[in-house]
Amino acid sequence: MAKTLHRLIVSVVVSALASIFFVAPAASADVSPMIVGGTRASTSTYPWVVYLASTSGSQFCGGTLVKANKVVTAAHCVKGRTPASTRVVHGRDDKQSTAGTVASVTRIWVHPSYTTATAGYDVAVLTLDRNISSATLPLATPADTALYAAGNSALILGWGTTSSGGSASRYLLKANVPLTSDATCKSAYSQYSNTSMVCAGFPQGGVDTCQGDSGGPLVFGGKLIGDTSWGRGCAAAGYPGVYGRIAPYYSVINAQL
Ligand code: ARG
């Protein structure tokens, strides 16, 4: 009896210590495991965020519903894909659930000047086989220059990886990142062009979009100001995320809607 009590006390003490030394570091790592450095979000709060999937249901990019049957995404997400091999999933926070709607794609428009993400024009429009009854997100227009001011805290959303080279998130994640100035982004990336791109991220890194978030929204002032495009690694200090700049493409995108 005394021996059993002694063992019990020992095991309680050992597990208490273990929780200090092992659980505590894991819990603090949990502070930044998502998008990179994000938290869970619901598609009921952001009803226009969608993901792109293969016919087998595997998520590969994000997108934004801008009209009942039109999704803006990144050109690099869909260039070379056939509409028949592409699905758009709306209203599903958890990729392992069957919530929401899976739409087929009937047409893929890729910006005609697109070659690679780092050269700009990284924007595409998908036409869906149905109208989704949901709120849509308006596009930034050429008049919306104020939305692109450095320091504006923009919203990013996606189901992509939670660290550079890590695995994709099961759940929709969100974070906020400040837009950087053109000078800051140009000094990080020689390929940066303020006519086709906009950058966002903290100088110290830690919060960013990552692989699988591409095509998804960068939102400020209630409008779609960018689509997730590229970056060096993810969330690295001195290397902000680069987004396709929507305002300059307003007319060509709008012509597709
Ligand atoms: N190219 C990536 C994709 O296809 C997005 C990378 C974004 N990188 C970044 N550091 N923000 O999903």
Image (cartoon, helix red, strand yellow):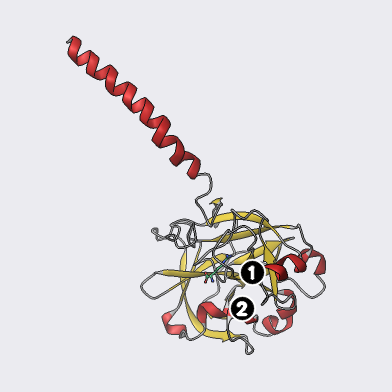
Label 1 near label 2: C-beta < 8 Å? yes
Residue 25: x and y in percent read 45, 39
- Residue 27 versus residue 237: which sits nearer the camera? 237
Query: On the image, which quarter does residue 98 sit in?
Result: bottom left
Q: Is mark 2 on a helix, strand or loop?
A: helix
Query: Is the residue at mark 1 in contact range of ligand 1, meaning its CB lies under 8 Å from it?
Result: yes
- The residue depicted at 50 percent of the width and 51 percent of the height is 33
- The residue depicted at 51 percent of the width and 57 percent of the height is 172
Report the disc number at residue 118: 2
Lower position in the chain sequence, tag 2 or tag 1 = 2
Q: Residues within 10 Å of mark 1 (few under 14, many from 20)?
A: many
Q: Which residue type does callout 2 highlight?
A: Thr
Asked if 29 appears above or below 231 in the picture, the reply is above
Query: Is the residue at mark 2 in contact range of ligand 1, meaning its CB lies under 8 Å from it?
Result: no
Q: What element carries label 1?
A: strand
Report the disc number at residue 242: 1
Residue 3: x and y in percent read 18, 13
Q: Which residue type does callout 1 highlight?
A: Val
Asked if 12 appears above or below 162 in the picture, the reply is above
Is 62 left, or right, of 120 in this rendering? left
Judge whether residue 123 can be spotted in this image: no
Is 7 left, or right, of 52 in this rendering? left
Is 134 left, or right, of 159 in this rendering? right
Instruction: Indicate the quadrant of ligand 1 in the picture.
Output: bottom right
- The residue depicted at 82 percent of the width and 73 percent of the height is 143
